[in-house]
Amino acid sequence: MIYYTMELKDLMKERREVLSLTQQDLAEMAQVGVATVKDIERGHGNPSLNTIKKILDVLGIEIEYKLRHRSK
C-alpha cells in the first residue's frame, strides 16, 4: 500500500487494525511503552524518529529519510 496524505496517527492505527494487533501488542513488539502508541494514535506526544521507526518496522511500513539542501 502507498500512503501519501495520511497522517502518522491514522496510518499506524489503520495498519495495526489490519494486522489485528492491539495497542498493547504493538507496544510490546516494538519495545515501546503502550502510552507512546496511544499518544501517537491520538496525535499527541513528540516521539523520536527512532521510536517511530521501531513501530513502523513492526507494522511493515518503511520510512524514508531525505535531506533537503538549502540554497544560499
Image (cartoon, rainbow, N blue to C red):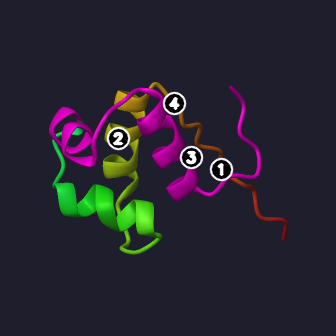
| Position in image of residue 34 (x %, y %) | 19, 55
Which quadrant of the figure has residue 3? top right
Between marks 2 and 3 in the image, the one whose residue lies nearer the viewer: 3
Q: Is residue 58 magenta?
A: no
| Position in image of residue 20 (x %, y %) | 37, 29
The reply to whether the C-beta atoms of the residues labelled 3 and 1 are less than 8 Å apart is no
Q: Which residues are magenta?
A: 1-29
Find the distance from the CA under tag 4 to the CA under tag 3: 9 Å
Q: Earlier in the sequence, mark 2 or mark 1?
A: 2
Between marks 3 and 1 in the image, the one whose residue lies nearer the viewer: 3
Q: Callout 3, which amino acid? A: Leu
Query: Dot 3, how many residues are within 10 Å of its Cα: few (below 14), some (14-19), or many (20+)?
Result: some
Q: Earlier in the sequence, mark 3 or mark 1?
A: 3
Report whether 21 appears left or right of 24. Answer: right
Q: Is residue 62 above or below residue 54?
A: above
Dominant secondary-structure state across the stretch colored magenta: helix
Disc 1 secondary structure class:
loop
Find the distance from the CA under tag 3 to the CA under tag 1: 23 Å
| Position in image of residue 70 (x %, y %) | 77, 64
Report whether 64 appears left or right of 60. Answer: right
Q: Callout 1, which amino acid? A: Leu
Query: Dot 2, how many residues are within 10 Å of its Cα: few (below 14), some (14-19), or many (20+)?
Result: many
Q: Earlier in the sequence, mark 4 or mark 3?
A: 3
The reply to whether the C-beta atoms of the residues labelled 4 and 3 are less than 8 Å apart is yes
| Residue that carries the numbered disc 4 in the rendered image | 61
Q: Is residue 14 above or below residue 8?
A: above
| Residue that carries the numbered disc 3 in the rendered image | 11
Between marks 1 and 4 in the image, the one whose residue lies nearer the viewer: 4
Between marks 4 and 3 in the image, the one whose residue lies nearer the viewer: 3
Q: Is residue 46 above or below residue 18?
A: below
Q: Which mark is residue 55?
A: 2
